Amino acid sequence: MKKYIPPIAMLAVFETVAVVLWLTKDNLFYLFNFSYIGISVALGVFLFIRKYKHARRVTQLLVGCYMLIYLGLICNENMQIEGFWYYLFTGVFEAATIHYAVAKIFGPLLFGRGWCGYACWTAMVLDLLPYKQPSQPRRKLGFIRYITFALSLAFVAALFLAHVGNIEKIMFWAFIIGNLLYYAVGAVPAVCFKDNRAFCKYICPITVFLKPMSYFSLLRIKCDKAKCVSCGKCKQVCPMDVDILDNSRKRKNGTECILCMECVRNCPKNAL
């Protein structure tokens, strides 16, 4: 039963967050929201332990569709970075600010960039493309993420500085248009570079939050050097070009690991 401790622990973490937010915010929605996400993540980890090939994909679809369709389109909440700036400027700790605090600012101290691998609705769609393993060298285009980050901040700041009315409605349409742009823009480098995760590597503004916090992540994939035969299979299947054989925090592209577990699943010696 020891092998099932990870999914139980993951569920416990999300349930703790769910109960704390429910009681402090006096809103039953948070109990449902984080319980659902916790169950979805725990299910994915459980299925992985059971060696189900599409374990991560199950969680990705459960969480991604919930946030995109239910929270975004039905509840009219902008869960993109513009929504975070919006609530931050209004000084309200709700919706997107709570989401970012848990999943993208403080959460990565525990689970790194697990958000990117198991919950991101942009990656959920882009992962449908056929280029799951990058076949070309990584480009030096990471600076683009800082441009999109700055543009998102400037867009929302301009709305507040100009005292534009009905900003909530603008945020909703920004969520819809922004997602369509993300999919369209993300598909271009994916096809050009033959890499589904090109958007994550070069363009996504969220990584500005994720990368520095992921450096200190508690959950990390490590290599048992005694078992490793240096076959290179782990590097071939890694969608984020992480040098997983290096156990140090300074390993190449170390803050890019999305905990997809492809390296673990494909290691012939169970060294990871």
Image (cartoon, rainbow, N blue to C red):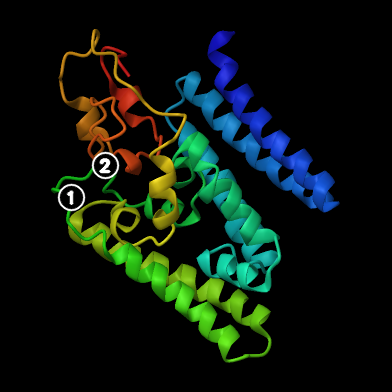
Q: Residue at 69% of width from left, 65% of height from top? A: 74
Relative to 19, residue 227 above or below? above
Q: Amino acid at mark 1?
A: Arg
Q: Could you tell me which secondary element the residue under label 1 belongs to?
A: loop
Give the Cα distance between marks 2 and 1: 10 Å
Q: Choose the circle earlier in sequence order: 2 or 1.
A: 1
The residue at which mark 2 appears reads as: 253
Asked whether disc 2 touches disc 1, contact meaning CB atoms under 8 Å apart, the reply is yes
The residue at which mark 1 appears reads as: 138
| Residue 91 in the image, given as x and y percentages of width and height | 68, 68
Q: Quadrant of the C terminus?
A: top left
Q: Residue at 40% of width from left, 62% of height from top? A: 205
Q: Residue at 62% of width from left, 67% of height from top? A: 88
Q: Is residue 216 left or right of residue 161?
A: left
Label 2 neighbourhood size at 10 Å, few (<14), some (14-19), many (20+)? some
Residue 252 lies in what quarter of the image? top left
Label 1 neighbourhood size at 10 Å, few (<14), some (14-19), many (20+)? some
